[in-house]
Image (spheres, rainbow, N blue to C red):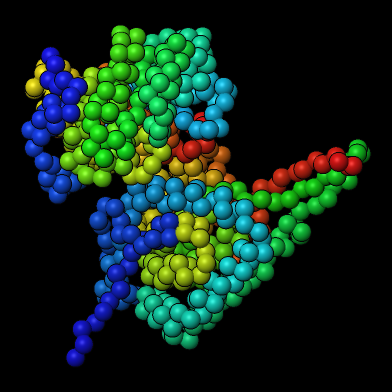
């Protein structure tokens, strides 16, 4: 169903009908949901669920093939001492490391783990459309099956919504059925929750399969109120169109407690259907170690330490 | 008439003064069972947070120069000197001893900081060695910090036992998680206020108050605690901690003597370096 044509007036008309976000309400609801206490059996389930939702990420200028391979190995068997730990949701790297990651995953039995590439001049998005397209094509040709693109925040904030919209449409076209498209809103630069809601709907109307909070390169990143608003957006979108769009918070989620808070938000906002790696992912690197340590605590009964998980 | 402004006795974790996450407190009484205060009753999660803080502070503290550590320990003595009245009052109140006897304990405790401050940059010279070997190498052995140390100081002493346990541990470059004497915890909290104002980085010393028998098993089983000073543990708790502590090969020691460099060396391990001559 085509809700929006790519013209300025139709985009504006569509976004104008969205209700404003009650910021104080959103913050207090997110804070309230964060106080839920998840214990024992539920906690065990939540930890495994969170592990299977992680997009294990390395996005550093200093990334090497060796580091990417090590990360892939960890993605398949997060805890080598315990085969019951599930594999993570995906590996997320820069596009020149996609081939390395794909090849290594296939070699070690991780064929089912997708490789996501950050694209379109990540993290700033400051490049011409041609460069962004080429960037995306490179990643697709190297074997990426998920594309994390950034929107042009400058264009969004100055009101050039057509530019934001058409860029997403073009990249979506390139992805076709070869790859899932995740659209990064970089909510830390969008200033208000109203903008977050608008950008979420704009991205979904343009064809996003996932909406993602942040690049992880600026702070604040995936704060609870922002994730709440985005989950409300996908819930509303489902009511409008019958299509379920995924959500991916990324950046700043480091502890098991943070991750479980995210799961509670999902359950209480979008609904249980979203509690699957197909519709909810967590972009993180340090989080996995904390989840593994908590899992060891549940298994052995005593607190684990960072000596018992890998350094990455 | 002025209303009393009484101190809330809180925990000391990572350089901050939180209440227990459990929200609990317990009652501390003087020798005649009169109510004195309601310090925080730390839970196992407070202990876990304290260990995380201690682990986080370890790199900076063990990597600081011995001279710098020594200056900071001396600074702690200075800060305690300024608060000595408060310590005297708390000791006299809780232990039911005279102010003169209490003052003596405080002076000894402050002197212990100065004494260990002097040891910081001497221990590796005294305990380390240059080893004779038959080969083209320089060969050194030096003592280094063992890591995060859990401390159960002597139960019967408010301040002196506490300082005699903490000072050698941090002088050696370790970070500490202290479970204060259950009956006499007030000085430990006042000590944490002196520590917080003495250039000691947050997390190097973390002080918990609460029920020793509740916290000791968690300390013993914690895989990220490298050693334990079990001086203040009962026979049963000591045994339990030694059994669970075997899982990660904790160094567990009990001490009867006070100021001695052996207390530092108990929480240090030797590293031997082979360095080729001529490179």
Q: Position of residue A298 (x, y in %)?
A: 35, 32
Q: Is residue B227 visible?
A: no
Above or below, B30 against A125 in this view is: below
Residue at x 20%, y 39% (from the top left corner) = A195
What is the tally of numbered marks visible in this picture? Answer: 0
Q: Quadrant of residue A118?
A: top left
Residue name at image x 54 percent, y 51 percent: B58
Residue that sits furthest to the bottom in the current view:
B1
Q: Residue at x 36, y 62 (%)?
A: B17
Q: Is residue A148 visible?
A: yes
Task: Identify the residue shown where x is 54% and y is 77%.
Answer: B78
Foreground of the two, A166 or A223: A166
Q: Position of residue B91 (x, y in %)?
A: 42, 77
Residue B132 placement, left or right of B31: right
Q: Position of residue B10 (x, y in %)?
A: 33, 64
Figure check: B25 above or below A50:
below
């Amino acid at each position: 169903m085509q809700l929006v044509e790519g013209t300025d007036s139709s985009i504006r008309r569509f976004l104008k009908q969205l209700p404003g976000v009650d910021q104080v309400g959103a913050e207090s609801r997110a804070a309230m949901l964060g106080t839920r206490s998840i214990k024992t059996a539920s906690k065990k389930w939540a930890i495994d669920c969170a592990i299977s939702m992680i997009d294990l990420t390395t996005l550093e200028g200093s990334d090497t093939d060796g580091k990417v391979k090590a990360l892939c190995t960890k993605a398949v068997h997060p805890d080598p001492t315990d085969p019951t730990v599930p594999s993570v949701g995906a590996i997320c790297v820069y596009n020149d490391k996609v081939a390395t990651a794909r090849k290594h995953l296939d070699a070690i039995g991780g064929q089912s783990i997708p490789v996501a590439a950050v694209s379109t001049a990540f993290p700033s998005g400051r490049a011409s459309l041609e460069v962004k397209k080429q960037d995306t094509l490179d990643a697709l040709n190297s074997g990426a099956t998920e594309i994390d693109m950034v929107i042009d925040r400058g264009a969004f904030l100055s009101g050039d919504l057509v530019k934001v919209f058409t860029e997403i449409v073009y990249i979506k076209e390139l992805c076709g059925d070869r790859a899932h498209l995740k659209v990064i809103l970089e909510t830390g630069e969008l200033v208000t929750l109203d903008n977050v809601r608008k950008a979420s709907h704009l991205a979904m109307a343009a064809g996003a399969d996932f909406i993602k909070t942040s690049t992880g390169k600026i702070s604040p990143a995936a704060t609870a109120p922002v994730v709440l608003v985005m989950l409300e957006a996908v819930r509303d979108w489902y009511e409008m169109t019958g299509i379920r769009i995924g959500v991916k918070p990324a950046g700043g989620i480091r502890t098991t407690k943070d991750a479980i808070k995210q799961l509670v938000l999902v359950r209480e906002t979008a609904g249980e259907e979203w509690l699957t790696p197909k519709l909810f992912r967590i972009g993180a690197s340090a989080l996995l170690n904390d989840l593994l340590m908590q899992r060891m605590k549940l298994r052995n009964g005593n607190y684990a330490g960072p000596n018992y998980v890998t350094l990455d | 008439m002025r209303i009393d402004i009484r101190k809330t006795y809180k925990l000391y974790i990572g350089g901050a003064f939180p209440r227990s996450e459990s929200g609990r407190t317990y009652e501390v009484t003087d020798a005649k069972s009169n109510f004195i205060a309601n310090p925080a009753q730390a839970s196992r999660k407070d202990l876990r947070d304290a260990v995380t803080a201690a682990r986080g502070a370890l790199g900076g503290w063990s990597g600081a120069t011995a001279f710098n550590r020594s200056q900071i320990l001396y600074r702690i003595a200075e800060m305690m000197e300024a608060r000595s009245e408060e310590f005297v009052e708390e000791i006299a109140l809780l232990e039911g001893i005279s102010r003169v006897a209490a003052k003596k304990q405080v002076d000894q405790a402050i002197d212990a900081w100065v004494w260990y401050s002097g040891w910081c940059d001497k221990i590796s010279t005294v305990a380390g060695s240059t080893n004779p070997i038959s080969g083209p190498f320089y060969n050194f052995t030096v003592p280094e910090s063992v890591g995060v140390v859990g401390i159960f100081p002597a139960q019967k002493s408010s301040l002196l036992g506490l300082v005699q346990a903490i000072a050698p541990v941090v002088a050696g470059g370790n970070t500490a998680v202290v479970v204060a004497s259950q009956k006499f915890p007030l000085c430990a909290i006042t000590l944490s206020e002196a520590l917080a104002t003495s250039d000691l980085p947050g997390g190097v010393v973390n002080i918990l108050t609460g029920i020793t028998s509740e916290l000791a098993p968690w300390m013993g089983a914690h895989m990220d605690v490298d050693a334990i000073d079990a001086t203040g543990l009962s026979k049963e708790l000591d045994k339990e901690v030694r059994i669970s502590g075997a899982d990660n090969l904790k160094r567990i020691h009990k001490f009867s003597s006070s100021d001695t460099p052996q207390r530092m060396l108990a929480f240090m391990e030797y590293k031997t370096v082979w360095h080729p001559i001529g490179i």
